[in-house]
Amino acid sequence: MKKYIGIDIGGTSIKCALVTEEGKIHKKFGFPIIKGEKQETTIYRLGDLINDEIKKEGLRKEDFVGIGVGCPGSINNKLGVCCYNNNIGWLNLPVADLLKERTGIASKVSNDANVAMLGEAKFGAAKNYQNAVLVTLGTGVGGGLFLNGKLYEGNEGKGAEIGHMVIEMDGELCTCGRKGCLEAYASVTALIRQTKEAMHKHPESKMWAYVNNELDAVNGKTAFETSKMGDETAIEVVDRYENYLTVGLLNFCNIFRPEVILIGGGLSNQKEYLTDALQKKLEENKYGFQGTPKVNIFVTNLGNDAGVLGAAALWMEEK
């Protein structure tokens, strides 16, 4: 049976897994990223840990097809290099070469959102589809594209930056430095800003009681949970937020015509309360209306394992 190693590099920790070709996780392991540590040292520590875990399990390096790595930031997938990661502070780090040097196992690297998309396509909510879009709603808006049965990454793996599609000319300032990006309107960060703005205008809103009058306690759930209580201000916040998000989803729908759009990230916990509303708005506004195939909207179902499974699947794409 073929075996793979999947690596999910996050902002504060690195998660690893030994994975079978059926997508079963044999063992999980990992370690926290040490702030300020030399970037090459972190990868060498990762390689040493992989060597140790393989030995502990009584396996041989020859048993593994390869190591797949999902890494946030700007990635050159052809060279296996993390060109830039602002959260960790990595710059032009040859992740694939360093891992192979330390472990003797061939390695591939891709953007973490692309890898999560591949995980869902191979083993998760998009398993039975040939065309899918993943939209992750968190601090920012990320995502991935699975088109005609293959992961689409663009030139050098730098495509699919769906959060930076402009939906409002000269709109809100985005963290990327441009204005009007989808991320500036549909991220959880944006939702929190929109919630606070509405609360300032409506001191009678139940949202104040929900956070015990502590504005700093507002999070991505505040408007959603109080809208379920019938609070009119919260209902308006949620509806406007969903309208912004729908603009992005409509663009993905009309450009790629996927069979399914997956919603991941923290807001995916709202499940049908979010996806049902988005589905309705999408069907009412998509190009072609009823004359085009339905695009289903689901939440992801692999949770925190999407990264390691998708990273391992980078090698399964060779089949």
Image (spheres, helix red, strand yellow):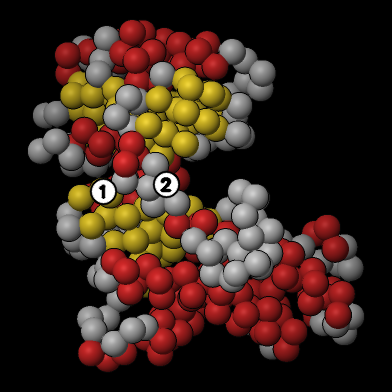
Among the 4 quarters of the image, the one containing residue 276: bottom left
Is residue 130 positioned above or below 157 on the image?
below
Identify the secondary structure beneath mark 1.
strand
Identify the secondary structure beneath mark 2.
helix
Is residue 175 positioned above or below 24 on the image?
below
Image point 45% across, 11% down: which residue? 44
Tell me the CA gap for discs 1 and 2: 11 Å
Residue 50 located left or right of residue 316: right
Q: Which amino acid, mark 1?
A: Leu
Q: Position of residue 190 (x, y in %)?
A: 67, 63
Q: Which amino acid, mark 2?
A: Ala
Q: Quarter holding the C terminus?
A: top left
Image point 61% across, 34% down: which residue? 87
Among the 4 quarters of the image, the one containing residue 289: bottom left
* Residue named by callout 2: 113
* Residue named by callout 1: 151
Image point 32% across, 24% down: which residue? 79
> Does residue 172 appear in the picture of this structure?
yes
